[in-house]
Amino acid sequence: MHASKTSILTAGIVALTIPATIAIAKVTNEVAPLEQSPRQIMLNGYEGDGRPMDDIGSNIPYGDLSAFDKITTIGEAQSPDVPYCDERAALLKTLDHDFAESPRVKKALGDNRSVELWASSVMGTWTAVYTRADGVSCVVSSGMGWEQGDNPVALLGREGILPAT
C-alpha cells in the first residue's frame, strides 16, 4: 500500500488538531461570587470594565427592574458601563442574527412592560430581555447551557426575574 504525501499530511494535521480541540473544550470560565447584586452595583454607581450585568448572574428581585427604566442612552451611543439597551426591534434582531436565539416565553409585567426569554438550542445561549413601557428593551441577564426542552419560566425564576415555579 502506498500513501501519498497529501494523505500523510492530512493524517498528521488531524492527529495534532484533535488533542488541541479537546484541550480548548476543557477551558472553564469560573466567576467569583458577588458581594452585591448586579442591580445594586448599578444603582450604587458602577465603576469598572464592561457592562455590570455581563457574566455575573442576576439577583434582581422579581418585578423590580426600575434600574433599567432609568437608562437614557441606548444603542451604539451607550457607554460600555451600563446594561445594554436598544430599540426592541434592533435588540431582538441582534439576538437572532448573532446568537441564533428565538423567543421561548414572554410574560407581561403590567404598565406595557414585559420580560421574555430568548434562547438557542444551536448555540446553547439564552438571554432575558426586559421591555420598558417606552418600547426600549434591555438585556437583564444571559448565559450558556440552554438545551431544547428546558423550561424558560423556570430559568427566569432561577435568575430572580420571575417568581420561581
Image: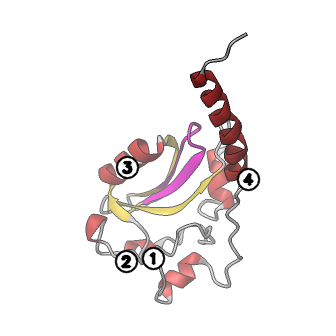
Q: Which residue position is annotated with label 3?
A: 94
Horizontal placement of 117 versus 35: left or right? left
Task: Identify residue for label 2.
Answer: 70
> Element at badge 4?
loop
Residue at horizontal 67 percent and vertical 36 percent from the top: 149
For disc 1, the marked residue is: 67
Picture coordinates of residue 62, whole percent (x, y): 60, 67
Nearer the observer: mark 4 or 1; the answer is: 4
Closer to the eye: label 4 or 2:
4
Nearer the N terminus, badge 1 or badge 3? 1
Q: Marks 1 and 3, how far apart in space?
A: 22 Å
Q: Amino acid at mark 2?
A: Lys
Q: Residue at x 46, y 74 (%)?
A: 50
Which quarter of the picture shows residue 69? bottom left
- Residue 114: in magenta span: no
**Farthest left residue?**
77
The residue depicted at 59 percent of the width and 38 percent of the height is: 121
Q: CA distance from mark 3 to mark 4?
A: 28 Å
Quadrant of residue 5 in the image? top right
Task: Name which of mark 4 and mark 2 comes first in the sequence.
Answer: 4
On the image, numbered disc 4 is attached to which residue?
26
| Type of the residue with mark 1 | Ala
Q: Amino acid at mark 4?
A: Lys
